[in-house]
Image: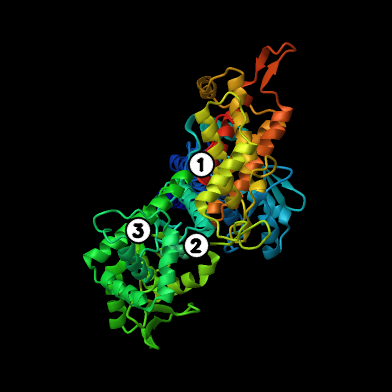
C-alpha cells in the first residue's frame, strides 16, 4: 500500500513540474495568445490540457489512497471489522493516534488516551496536552484531529466540546452488528499473537497436605489458563509437585516398617498426612530410624528399584487425594514434579560449575546475580539439590524443550523473593532472555479466617480441602437451590455448581495480592457481587425467552434477519456494556489480575437489571396472554446471557440452567 502511494506521489510531483513549466510558458504569452489557447476543454494546447487533466486525476487518486492507508493503519482491516469482538478502546486509540500523528507530526510519542465519557460514548483529550506543547489553542488542535480522523466503521461522529475535548460517538450500525455476531457466533475473542504458555499452578507437595494456599493457586491458575486458552494461546498446565526431597527418606523407611510387602501390594494408606506425621515423629525421636531415613534418600537418588517403588507408591496415594479435589473443582493439570528434573539438575550444575558461576559458601554452592536479593542455593553441603536447583533446571527445560515464550508461576506472595532470585540467576546464566520470553510470578495473599487470623478449623487444625468443599456443598444445600421442578440429579449438580462456584468466585473477585477472609456466609450471600447472585441472575435471563415459549432457534433466526434496532437508552447502554468485554480481557491479560472480570460481570448484571426494569421484552395483557414480543430485546437478553456465560467459563465456574 505504501509503495503504491509513493509511486503516485512521484507521478504527481512529475506532472506538477510539467504543469509549472507550461504555466511559465503561458505567463510569457500575451493575453490574446492565451485566449487563443483556451478552448471549450479549458486548454487548446493539447499537451497542456492532458497534463493538467492527469495531474487532477492523480491528485484525486492520491487522496483516496492516503485515506485508505490511514484506514488500514487505524483499523487493521477494511470495513467490516470481522466477526471477532474488538477492543474498542484499543481501536479508538489507534484511530486517534493516526490522526494525532498527522495533525502534529512534530510531537514525538503523543499521549493519546481514550476514556469513557459521561456525555458521549468515549472521549479523547489529546488536544489539551498537544496544545500546550505546540503553544496553540487546544480547540484548534482538536478541530484538526477530528478533521484528520481516518474513517472507521466504529465511529459515528467525533465532536469538539469545551476547551478542546473530543467526544466520540460509536456507530449504532456497528454496535448492532456486533451484538448480532455474539448471538450467532458466541463471543469470539479479539485476535492475539499466539504464545506458547506454560502455567505452573496448584503444585502441592507429596505426602504433605494440600492447604488453602494451594487452593488459591489452583483457582487463580486455572482461571488464567482458561483465559489464555480462550484467547487462543497454546497453554500447558503444569502441576509442579513437590515430589523429590529428603522427606522421602523417612517416608520410605516408615513404609518399609509398616507395609513390608509394599513392592508387591499397594499399601492401603488411608491418611497420608497421619502417615507423614508418624514418620516425622520417629525421625525426630528415634536415632537409628533417622540414620535409615538418610540412607533411604541416598538409595532413592541412586535409583535403587526398591526405593523407587516405595516412592512411586507414596506419590500415587498422594496424587489420588489431590485428584479428588481437582475433579470436584473441574481442574485439568498435567503432573510434572520436581523429580522430573533430576538428570537436568545434574547437567545444569555441571555446566554452572564449569563456567565458574557458582561460589563456595560454608560447603554449599551458591549463585549470586544482579537483582537477586538472596543468592540461590544450588548444591547443599551434603551434595543434594534444592528447590532452587529444580526451579533453575525447570525454567531451562521450559524455555529450551517446551519452547515456551510465556511462563507463569502462581504461588503465594511469600515466594516472591525466591522467584526474584530465580529470574535474576536464570538471566545471568543465560537461561532466560527477557526480550524473548515473558515470565510472570503471580503472587497472592494469605487466606484468613473470619477472625482475621490464619485460616483454621474451630479446634485449631489446618483445614483439609476436601472438608472445605464438603462444607461448601452442605451450606449450599441448606441455603439455596430449592427449585421444585429439578430432579434429584439436577439439584445435586446445581448445589455443587453453587458451592464450588462460590468458593472460586470469592477468591477471584478479590484483588489477589491482598490477604482474603474466607467466609461461607459472605460467599453464599444472594445479594451483591457474589456467585450466587450472578448465577441466579443468569438463570433468570436465560428463562425470559423460555417462559414465553420462544426457542433459541427462533431467537437466532431473528438475529439472522440483520442487526436489531436499539432505540431505548437502556438497550443502547446494555449493548455497549456487552461490547466492553474485550477491553476487560486485554487488561486482565496484561496484569493477570482477575477481579476486574468479576467486576465487569457484576456490571453487566446491574446494567441488565436497569434495562429489564425499563424495557418490556414480552408484553402481556391482564389475563397473562402474550400480546407482543419485542424480539430485539430478547436478542439483547440472549447476548447478555452469552457474555455472562463466557465470563463464568473463564472464571472456571459452571452455570446452571435452573436453580
Ligand atoms: N510446591 C510449591 C509449594 O507448595 C509450589 C511450587 C511452585 N512452582 C515452582 N516451579 N516453584 O509451595
Above or below 553: residue 67: below
Q: Quadrant of residue 294?
A: bottom left
Above or below 283: residue 529: above
**Label disc, if present, on residue 315 of the rendered structure:** 3
Q: Identify residue for label 2.
A: 411
Q: Is mark 2 within 8 Å of ligand 1?
A: yes
Question: Where does the C terminus fall, quadrant-wise?
Answer: top right
Q: Is residue 123 visible?
A: no
Q: Position of residue 111 (x, y in %)?
A: 62, 59
Q: Position of residue 23 (x, y in %)?
A: 52, 50
Q: Residue at x 67, y 63 (%)?
A: 134
Q: Is 573 in front, or is 588? A: 588
Q: Identify residue for label 1.
A: 649
Q: CA distance from mark 3 to mark 2?
A: 21 Å
Q: Is 460 in front, or is 496? A: 460
- N-term mark: 1 or 3: 3
Secondary-structure class at tag 2: strand
Secondary-structure class at tag 3: helix
Residues packed near mark 2 inside 10 Å, few (<14), some (14 to 19) or many (20 plus): many
Residues packed near mark 3 inside 10 Å, few (<14), some (14 to 19) or many (20 plus): many
Q: Position of residue 440 (x, y in %)?
A: 48, 62
Please state the quadrant of the image where ligand 1 appears: bottom left
Amino acid at each position: 500500500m505504501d509503495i503504491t502511494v509513493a509511486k503516485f506521489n512521484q507521478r504527481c510531483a512529475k506532472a506538477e513540474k510539467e504543469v509549472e513549466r507550461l504555466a511559465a510558458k503561458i505567463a510569457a504569452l500575451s493575453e490574446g495568445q492565451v485566449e487563443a489557447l483556451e478552448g471549450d476543454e479549458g486548454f487548446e494546447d493539447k499537451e497542456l490540457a492532458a497534463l493538467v487533466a492527469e495531474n487532477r486525476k492523480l491528485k484525486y487518486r492520491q487522496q483516496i489512497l492516503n485515506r485508505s492507508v490511514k484506514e488500514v493503519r487505524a483499523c487493521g482491516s477494511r470495513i467490516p471489522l470481522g466477526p471477532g469482538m474488538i477492543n474498542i478502546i484499543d481501536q479508538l486509540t489507534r484511530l486517534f493516534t493516526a490522526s494525532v500523528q498527522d495533525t502534529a507530526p512534530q510531537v514525538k510519542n503523543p499521549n493519546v488516551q481514550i476514556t469513557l465519557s459521561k456525555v458521549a460514548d468515549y472521549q479523547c483529550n489529546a488536544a489539551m496536552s498537544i496544545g500546550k506543547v505546540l503553544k496553540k489553542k487546544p480547540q484548534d488542535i482538536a478541530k484538526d484531529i477530528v478533521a484528520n480522523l481516518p474513517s472507521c466503521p466504529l465511529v459515528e461522529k467525533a465532536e469538539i466540546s469545551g476547551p478542546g475535548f473530543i467526544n466520540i460517538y460509536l456507530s449504532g450500525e456497528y454496535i448492532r452488528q456486533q451484538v448480532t455476531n455474539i448471538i450467532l457466533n458466541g463471543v469470539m475473542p479479539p485476535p492475539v499473537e499466539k504464545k506458547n504458555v506454560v502455567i505452573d499452578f496448584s503444585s502441592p507437595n507429596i505426602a504433605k497436605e494440600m492447604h488453602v494456599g494451594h487452593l488459591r493457586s489452583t483457582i487463580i491458575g486455572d482461571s488464567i489458563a482458561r483465559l489464555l486458552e480462550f484467547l487462543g494461546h497454546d497453554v500447558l498446565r503444569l502441576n509442579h509437585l513437590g515430589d523429590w526431597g529428603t522427606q522421602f527418606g523417612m517416608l520410605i523407611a516408615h513404609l518399609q516398617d509398616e507395609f513390608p510387602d509394599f513392592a508387591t501390594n499397594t499399601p492401603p494408606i488411608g491418611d497420608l498426612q497421619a502417615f507423614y506425621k508418624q514418620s516425622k515423629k520417629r525421625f525426630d525421636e528415634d536415632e537409628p530410624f533417622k540414620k535409615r531415613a538418610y540412607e533411604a534418600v541416598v538409595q532413592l537418588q541412586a535409583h535403587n528399584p526398591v526405593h523407587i517403588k516405595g516412592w512411586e507408591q507414596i506419590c500415587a496415594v498422594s496424587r489420588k487425594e489431590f485428584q479428588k479435589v481437582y475433579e470436584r473443582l473441574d481442574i485439568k493439570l498435567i503432573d510434572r514434579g520436581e523429580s522430573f528434573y533430576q538428570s537436568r539438575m545434574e547437567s545444569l550444575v555441571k555446566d554452572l560449575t564449569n563456567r565458574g558461576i557458582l561460589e563456595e559458601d560454608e560447603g554449599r554452592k551458591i549463585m549470586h546475580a544482579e537483582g537477586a536479593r538472596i543468592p540461590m542455593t544450588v548444591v547443599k553441603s551434603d551434595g543434594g539439590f534444592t528447590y532452587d536447583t529444580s526451579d533453575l533446571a525447570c525454567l531451562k527445560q521450559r524455555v529450551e524443550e517446551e519452547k515456551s515464550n510465556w511462563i507463569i508461576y502462581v504461588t503465594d506472595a511469600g515466594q516472591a523473593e525466591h522467584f526474584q532470585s530465580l529470574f535474576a540467576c536464570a538471566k545471568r546464566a543465560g537461561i532466560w532472555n527477557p526480550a524473548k520470553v515473558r515470565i510472570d510470578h503471580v503472587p497472592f495473599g494469605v487466606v484468613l479466617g473470619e477472625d482475621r487470623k490464619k485460616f483454621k478449623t474451630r479446634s485449631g487444625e489446618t483445614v483439609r480441602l476436601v472438608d472445605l468443599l464438603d462444607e461448601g456443598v452442605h451450606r449450599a444445600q441448606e441455603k439455596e437451590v430449592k427449585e421444585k421442578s429439578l430432579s434429584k440429579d439436577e439439584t445435586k449438580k446445581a448445589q455443587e455448581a453453587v458451592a464450588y462456584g462460590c468458593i472460586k468466585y470469592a477468591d477471584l473477585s478479590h484483588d489477589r495480592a491482598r490477604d482474603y477472609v474466607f467466609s461461607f456466609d459472605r460467599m453464599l450471600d444472594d445479594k451483591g457481587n457474589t456467585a450466587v447472585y450472578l448465577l441466579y441472575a443468569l438463570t433468570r435471563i436465560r428463562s425470559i425467552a423460555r417462559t414465553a415459549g420462544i426457542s433459541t432457534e427462533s431467537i437466532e433466526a431473528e438475529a439472522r434477519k440483520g442487526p436489531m434496532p436499539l432505540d431505548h437508552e437502556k438497550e443502547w447502554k446494555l449493548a455497549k456494556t456487552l461490547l466492553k468485554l474485550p477491553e476487560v480481557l486485554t487488561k486482565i491479560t496484561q496484569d493477570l489480575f482477575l477481579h476486574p472480570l468479576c467486576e465487569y460481570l457484576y456490571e453487566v448484571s446491574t446494567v441488565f437489571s436497569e434495562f429489564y426494569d425499563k424495557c418490556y421484552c414480552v408484553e402481556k395483557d391482564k389475563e397473562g396472554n402474550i400480546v407482543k414480543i419485542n424480539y430485539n430485546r430478547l436478542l439483547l437478553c440472549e447476548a447478555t446471557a452469552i457474555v455472562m456465560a463466557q465470563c463464568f467459563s473463564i472464571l472456571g465456574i459452571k452455570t446452571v440452567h435452573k436453580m
